[in-house]
Image (cartoon, rainbow, N blue to C red):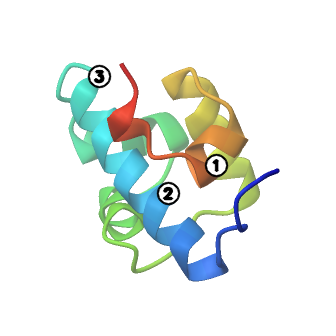
Amino acid sequence: MDKTPLTESEMYALLAKNLSYLRKSKGGLSQKAVARFLCLPPKTIMNYENCRTTPLAYAVLKLAHYYGCTVEDLLTKNLTERK
């Protein structure tokens, strides 16, 4: 049986943590480099990673593709624990 689903705020916090972790683990990319990839201002990436704002679905899809994971993993799994 599956464990209790995440709340919306837990999901956003996990997304923020995963985005920061993946960016840093991918050769120490800067927020500016990721922002360029998404055609967004660098401050937007900072806000995503600090859980101040949440990305649109399209941005989450693009980020998942860029980092080589699924949208579901990005939103629901703690990727810092993967080996």
Q: CA distance from mark 2 to mark 1?
A: 9 Å
Q: Which residue is mark 2?
A: 15
- Quarter residue 16 falls in: bottom left
The tag earlier along the polypeptide, 1 or 3, is 3
26 relative position to 41: left or right: left
Find numbered disc 2 in the image and state the secondary structure of the residue it sits on. helix
* Left or right: 56, with 19 as reference point: right
Q: Return the residue at label 3.
A: 26
**According to the image, label 1 marks what residue?**
60
Query: Regarding mark 3 in the picture, which secondary structure is present there?
Result: loop
| Circles 2, 1 touching at the beta carbon (< 8 Å) | yes
- Mark 2–mark 3 Cα distance, whole angstroms, equals 16 Å
Q: Position of residue 41 (x, y in %)?
A: 39, 59
Q: Is residue 52 above or below residue 68?
A: below
Residue type at tag 3: Lys
Q: Amino acid at mark 1?
A: Val
